[in-house]
Amino acid sequence: MSADKHFTARRGFIAGSGFGLLSLYLVWAGYGAAPLGFDRHGEEAGDAHADAPADGGHGGHGEAPGGPSREEFRKVADAFIQEHKLADGSVQVPRPHHGAAEVYLMAQQWAYAPAVLRLQAGVPYRFRMMAMDIAHGAAIHLGSGSRIIRLRPGVVVEQELTFAAPGEHLVYCTVYCGLPHDRMQGRIIVAKASA
């Protein structure tokens, strides 16, 4: 090897850099945030629910097997937004008489619908979410940490959340979805529970 080659042109540096980047990507994929053509169990993306439980249970990632199409989900989510929309454009989800309150959230380039949710502390909410165009994520900022939810196009993902205290929580995308990705945000405003 000649002495005048820059260290970045040497095979060891190139191999080490490639291995390092591949390792970081595999960690990212293992965490569930990387866009892959297969899920963590190695199944093809289109066959992710081929061996879903026959009892209608949820897959390993909170996905509802045999769920609605994108168009059907959009109709239900739009109806949910219109029914609970306030004058300021936010959506206030009423406290249920029993069980968890249903919340619908659509992720699409480069926004969430609804953009602002108003919830109550101590009330269980069942979030039903779907990416409407390409892969997105929904990280719900909860104090010093976040609940990170991977959203695949056309797949309903369900998560049950209960916010313990009043406050405001940021919702942001965790999967790169284009240049305005860093502006893809929403808010959850949690109020003190009413009696």
Image (tube, rainbow, N blue to C red):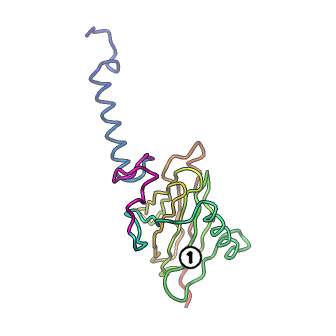
> Between 125 and 120, which is closer to the camera in this rendering?
125
The image position of residue 31, as x and y in percent, is 36, 53
- Label 1: which secondary element: strand
Prevailing SS of the magenta stretch: loop
Residue pictured at 48% horizontal, 68% vertical: 158
**How many numbered marks are there?**
1
Residue pictured at 54% horizontal, 54% vertical: 153
- Quadrant of the image for the N terminus? top left
The image position of residue 62, as x and y in percent, is 43, 66
> Between 64 and 47, which is closer to the camera in this rendering?
47
Q: Which residue is mark 1?
A: 119
Left or right: residue 30 versus residue 183 is left
The image position of residue 170, as x and y in percent, is 53, 62
Q: Residue furthest bottom?
A: 195
Residue pictured at 60% horizontal, 60% vertical: 70
Quadrant housing residue 104: bottom right
Left or right: residue 66 versus residue 1 is right
Q: Does the magenta portion include 187?
A: no
Residue pictured at 63% horizontal, 70% vertical: 76
Give the vertical position of 142 relative to 2 (above or below).
Answer: below
Give the vertical position of 193 relative to 56 (above or below).
Answer: below
Three-letter code for the amino acid on which mark 1 is drawn: Leu
Give the vertical position of 135 relative to 4 (above or below).
Answer: below
Left or right: residue 70 versus residue 162 is right
Quadrant housing residue 61: bottom left
| The magenta segment | 35-53
Q: Does the magenta portion include 44?
A: yes
Q: Residues within 10 Å of mark 1 (few under 14, many from 20)?
A: many
> Between 172 and 157, which is closer to the camera in this rendering?
157
- Quadrant of the image for the C terminus? bottom right
The image position of residue 119, as x and y in percent, is 56, 76
